[in-house]
Amino acid sequence: MAKKLGFWTENFEKFTSDQSALVGTLFATLQGCGSDFTNTFRTLSDFSSSENNDATILDRLVNLSSPKELLMKQARSPLFDNQKLLMILKMDPEILKNFGYDPDQIKRELDESTKKMEELEEADEEKM
């Protein structure tokens, strides 16, 4: 990973905290916009600090993202009905535990899904 991101040197032992944060942000961004990880790394490998190709690389990276319509469709069609899950969480979270689900994890995922949907809708409104 360090080599792919240009952090590797002969003396490399582990990521610094700043590098770890950058890698975490990169993966969260890739997942959030549905980018293909392999092609993203291939595109980043074309980056050269000696050339002025920032805009070209950025355009290529943006084109690797899933279309906005697909991201919105995925955000709107969760695996489970959010309202029903929320109702179960409020009434009796033990039911979810009986099926092997962590109620706290489900709550976090529902909150994240709601936030992602709101961000997509805001981005869509800003473009209009």
Image: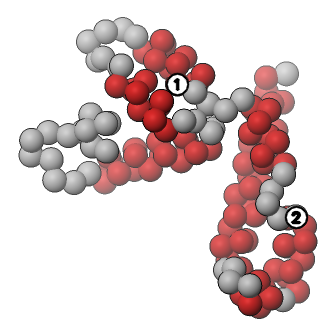
| Depth order, front residue of 84/21 | 84
**Badge 1 amino acid:** Leu
Q: Locate residue 45, reporting x and y percent.
A: 34, 25
State the colouring used for the structure image.
secondary structure
Q: Is residue 110 above or below residue 30?
A: below
**Badge 2 amino acid:** Asp
Residue 16 appears left or right of 105: left
Mark 2 lies on residue: 81
Q: Is residue 111 above or below residue 56?
A: below
Question: Quadrant of the rendered structure where residue 10 is?
Answer: top left
Q: Secondary structure at mark 1?
A: helix
Q: Locate residue 56, reporting x and y percent.
A: 48, 12
Q: Residue at x 70, y 58 (%)?
A: 112
Q: Residues within 10 Å of mark 2 (few under 14, many from 20)?
A: few
Q: Locate residue 64, reporting x and y percent.
A: 58, 27
Q: Residue at x 70, y 64 (%)?
A: 109
Q: Residue at x 26, y 12 (%)?
A: 50
Residue 41 appears left or right of 106: left
Residue 46 appears left or right of 90: left
Cα–Cα span, label 2 and label 1: 33 Å
Picture quarter with the C terminus:
top right
Mark 1 lies on residue: 61
Q: Is residue 122 visible?
A: no
Q: Do the residues bearing badges 2 and 1 touch, measured as CB atoms within 8 Å?
A: no
Q: Is residue 72 above or below residue 114?
A: above
Q: Residues within 10 Å of mark 1 (few under 14, many from 20)?
A: some
Picture quarter with the N terminus:
top left
Question: Quadrant of the rendered structure where residue 98 is?
Answer: bottom right
Question: Quadrant of the rendered structure where residue 42 is?
Answer: top left
Identify the disc placed on residue 3: none
Q: Secondary structure at mark 2?
A: loop
